[in-house]
């Protein structure tokens, strides 16, 4: 159930139809409500405020028609501006960013505002009666339509500003960087050195792992696609209920092919068709990666922006440097987090689930490898990479994390030695490397 809720919610958040449709439905309810309350409320407002619409049927019809026509026209203009922004972002910064733009609630709200105002005026317009014997003008509803039109003008002005800001490269990079940091906060909640001491989970003995490898049976994927979400609680409950151990062969972000092993179950003789179906229901597959449980997805988005900026056709090292800055900010936070154990136990301390986990080294490789490869001929990018490693070194306290940073620093400086032609450029890179090397060689406790 959680998997289906996740898939539905992610699809809804990334759509241009849900929020505008909800606002349109609310506008229809509002229209019927204001028409039903028109007579008593209009009399009270006229006596106390005096600002309600007091014209006749012809004037009300003309006013509502003008507002409705202008709203649907502006809605088309807003949609065209949105498509232009999407096209620009896709061609300049990468097609993977289209999902971020489509999840922008500001754009969805703006579209919904104009559509809702249009529908409100249309519904109120049909209630006006012009007969000599029966004449009805919903003064309150017409007055509210004018208020909605004024609000829509303000929304249009704000949307023009929002689009102008949102297509700027630095704003997009900051947007993705914020999403990356939020993912780290969500997936790595425990801070090093805070709260009660944690008892690390020891791996199972070698005999059990050998027996698991011989006796476990695979469960194939029910379809093709990227793993978007894994319901860990459901897998734990299934393992406890069936008294088995489940080892995941893929993690969120991996692409799986139908019928290829998704998990291994031990002991294999307890595998049933019902268990196979229930385990497959715990995995959400889709056509694209999502940042919900996939920390590398947001990293790859920043990396894609950086390497596109470093391409000969664009040649924009400043955008690449901005991406490196935000990657460094995320790595500084990740270095302060406890890495989760791949071994999950139940309340009786019985091993139930083994899952592949993200490590600091994995995220570091994803962040630096391609930028290092494409940016080795750029002095500015190379220097910023080494400066970022030195910055992250101040937060890295685990020896394996510092070793990963030092490995990348050495690869960066080796690439620069082969690509940079000027001696002074190479000397400057060497100075940054020596500074980072010194910080990484010091005892972690000395940096605290």
Image (cartoon, grey):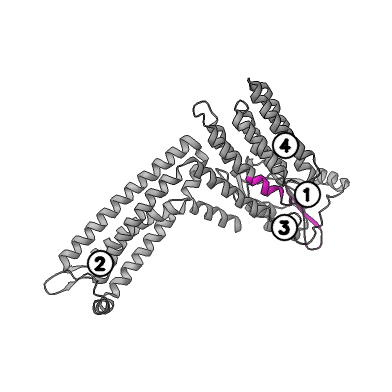
Q: Nearer the viewer, mark 1 or mark 4?
A: 4
Write the residue at 67% across / 46% down: 332
Q: Is residue 418 above or below residue 73?
A: above
At which x and y percent is residue 46?
Answer: 24, 77
Q: Are marks 2 and 1 in contact (CB under 8 Å)?
A: no
At which x and y percent is residue 270?
Answer: 77, 53
Extent of the magenta region: 329-356
Q: Are marks 3 and 4 in contact (CB under 8 Å)?
A: no
Cα separation between marks 3 and 4 = 43 Å
Write the residue at 41% across / 56% down: 109
Which residue carries the number 2 mark?
142
Q: Mark 2 Cα within 10 Å, few/some/many (few <14, many 20+)?
A: many
Q: Mark 1 Cα within 10 Å, few/some/many (few <14, many 20+)?
A: some
Identify the image quadrant of residue 404: top right
Q: Mark 3 Cα within 10 Å, few/some/many (few <14, many 20+)?
A: some
Specify which label sits upstream in the sequence, 4 or 2: 2
Disc number placed over residue 436 in the picture, else none? 4
Q: Residue furthest left?
A: 132
Disc number placed over residue 247 in the picture, else none? none
Disc number placed over residue 268 in the picture, else none? 1
Write the residue at 71% across / 44% down: 360
Secondary structure under tag 1 reads helix
At which x and y percent is residue 263?
Answer: 71, 47
Q: Is residue 38 visible?
A: yes
């Amino acid at each position: 159930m959680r998997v289906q809720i996740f898939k539905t919610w992610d699809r809804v958040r990334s759509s241009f139809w849900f929020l505008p449709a909800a606002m349109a439905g609310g506008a229809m309810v509002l229209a019927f409500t204001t028409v039903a309350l028109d007579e008593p409320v209009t009399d009270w407002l006229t006596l106390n405020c005096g600002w309600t619409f007091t014209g006749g049927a012809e004037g009300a019809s003309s006013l509502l028609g003008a507002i409705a026509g202008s709203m649907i026209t502006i809605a088309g203009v807003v949609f065209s501006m949105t498509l232009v922004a999407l096209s620009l972002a896709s061609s300049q910064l990468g097609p993977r960013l289209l999902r971020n733009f489509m999840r922008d609630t500001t754009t969805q709200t703006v579209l919904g505002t104009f559509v809702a105002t249009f529908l409100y005026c249309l519904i109120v317009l049909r209630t006006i009666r012009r007969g000599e014997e029966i004449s009805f003008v919903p003064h309150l509803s017409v007055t509210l339509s004018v208020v909605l039109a004024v609000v829509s003008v303000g929304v249009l002005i704000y949307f023009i500003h929002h689009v102008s800001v949102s297509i700027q490269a630095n704003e997009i990079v900051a947007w993705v960087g914020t999403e990356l940091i939020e993912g780290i906060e969500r997936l790595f909640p425990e801070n090093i050195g805070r709260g009660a001491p944690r008892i690390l989970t020891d791996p199972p003995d070698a005999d059990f792992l050998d027996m698991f490898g011989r006796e476990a049976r695979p469960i194939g994927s029910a379809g093709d696609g990227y793993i978007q979400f894994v319901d860990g609680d459901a897998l734990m409950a299934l393992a406890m209920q069936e008294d088995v151990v489940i080892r995941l062969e893929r993690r969120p972000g991996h692409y799986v092919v139908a019928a290829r092993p998704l998990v291994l179950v031990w002991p294999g003789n307890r595998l049933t068709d019902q268990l196979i179906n229930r385990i497959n229901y715990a995995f959400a597959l889709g056509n694209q990666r999502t940042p919900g449980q996939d920390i590398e997805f947001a990293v790859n988005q920043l990396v894609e922006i950086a390497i596109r900026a470093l391409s000969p056709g664009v040649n924009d090292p400043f955008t690449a440097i901005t991406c490196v800055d935000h990657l460094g900010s995320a790595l500084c936070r990740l270095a302060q987090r406890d890495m989760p154990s791949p071994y999950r136990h139940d309340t009786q301390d019985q091993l139930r689930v083994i899952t592949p986990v993200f490590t600091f080294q994995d995220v570091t490789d994803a962040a630096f490898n391609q930028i290092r490869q494409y940016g080795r001929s750029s002095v500015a990018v190379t220097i910023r990479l080494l400066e970022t490693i030195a910055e992250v070194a101040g937060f890295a306290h685990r020896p394996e994390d510092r070793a990963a940073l030092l490995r990348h620093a050495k690869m960066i400086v080796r690439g620069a030695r082969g690509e940079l032609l000027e001696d002074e450029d190479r000397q400057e890179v060497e100075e940054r490397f020596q500074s980072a090397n010194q910080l990484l060689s010091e005892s972690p406790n000395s940096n605290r």
